[in-house]
Image (tube, rainbow, N blue to C red):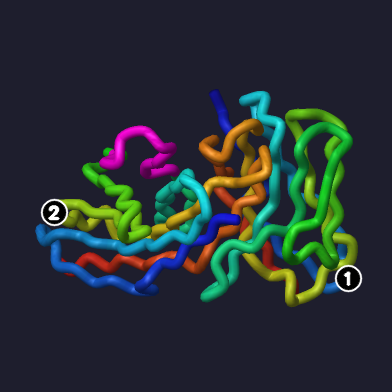
């Protein structure tokens, strides 16, 4: 079964500086991986997903993530943080067994300092 | 296209009362699920369903009932509300078939039990 570890519970960046949110995965086969974003008092929204196609995945709002098999990582990056990026981010493995029984961790809370 | 719709958005209950959180999706998704989100604990799966007439327990099912009489609807029932059930509840849905299917979330239901 797939699982992920988000290495930071909180990340703080200044507006205009790069964002790096780290996610490592553990899987015995090629996984599907997702990043979701949750803004305050909102539901979760899909940012991007990797499904064994291109290893560099571009998402919404200028975010991208690179699947690195050698490092078992799927880190989320953005070149320049905006105030509106302040939110909680979840790295999530795809479901296995033909249907999704996806588990979500505690996420990484991104703070953007003006 | 409405996506996943949850009602009510906010609810205050007294201990011992019962209530139903409604969830409907218009994407013909086979898979639907309910999560609760508590500070510092991420999203935890309560119940899920892979189709009409089929439901199963998740990680934290106690105190909750579900049913799936149609593909579109997946209500969550609190049988006798307790303060420990104060939380934010999210309904989610997705297609089945592969692990790369996106999960779509509702906007959340904030429940307070006093």
Q: Which residue is mark 1?
A: B16
Q: Secondary structure at mark 1?
A: loop
Please provide the residue range marked out in magenta: A46-57
Query: In the displayed structure, would residue B2 be above or below residue B106?
Result: above
Q: Which mark is residue A9?
A: none
* Chain at numbered mark 2: A
* Point 37% across, 44% down: residue: A47
Q: Nearer the viewer, residue B96 or A112?
A: B96
* Whole-percent x, y for residue B104 in the image: 55, 39
The N terminus of chain B is located in which quarter? top right
Q: Magenta span has A4? A: no
Residue B20 shown left or right of residue A85 in the figure:
right
Q: Residue lying furthest left in this view?
A: A16
**Neighbour class for label 1 at 10 Å: few (<14), some, many (≥20)?**
some
Q: Secondary structure at mark 2?
A: loop
Q: Which residue is mark 2?
A: A80
Quadrant assignment, res A5: bottom left
* Whole-percent x, y for residue A22 in the image: 32, 64
Q: Nearer the viewer, residue A73 or B17?
A: A73
Is the C-beta separation of discs 1 and 2 under 8 Å?
Answer: no
Q: Disc 1 and disc 2: Cα gap in Å?
A: 49 Å
Q: Magenta span has A56? A: yes
* Chain at numbered mark 1: B
Quadrant assignment, res B95: top right
Residue A88 shown left or right of residue A99 in the figure:
left
* Point 67% across, 40% down: residue: A99
Q: Nearer the viewer, residue A12 or B95?
A: B95
* Point 58% across, 62% down: residue: B43
Q: Viewer-nearest of labels 1 and 2?
A: 2
């Amino acid at each position: 079964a797939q699982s992920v570890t988000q290495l930071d519970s909180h990340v703080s960046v200044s507006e205009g500086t790069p964002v790096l949110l780290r996610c490592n995965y553990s899987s015995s086969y090629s996984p599907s991986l997702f990043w979701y974003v949750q803004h305050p008092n909102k539901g979760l929204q899909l940012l991007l997903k990797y499904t064994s196609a291109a290893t560099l995945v571009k998402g919404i709002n200028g975010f991208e993530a690179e699947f690195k098999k050698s490092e078992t990582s799927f880190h989320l990056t953005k070149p320049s943080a905006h105030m509106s990026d302040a939110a909680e981010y979840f790295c999530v493995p795809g479901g296995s067994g033909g249907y999704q029984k996806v588990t979500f961790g505690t996420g990484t809370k991104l703070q953007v300092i003006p | 296209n409405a996506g996943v719709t949850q009602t009510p958005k906010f609810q205050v209950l007294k201990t011992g009362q019962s209530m139903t959180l409604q969830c409907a999706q218009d994407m013909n998704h086979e898979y639907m699920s309910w999560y609760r989100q508590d500070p510092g604990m991420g999203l935890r799966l309560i119940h899920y369903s892979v189709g009409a007439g089929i439901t199963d327990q998740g990680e934290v099912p106690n105190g909750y009932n579900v049913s799936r009489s149609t593909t579109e609807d997946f209500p969550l029932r609190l049988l006798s509300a307790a303060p420990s059930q104060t939380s934010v509840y999210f309904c989610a849905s997705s297609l089945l078939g592969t692990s790369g299917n996106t999960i779509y979330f509702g906007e959340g239901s904030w429940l307070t039990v006093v």
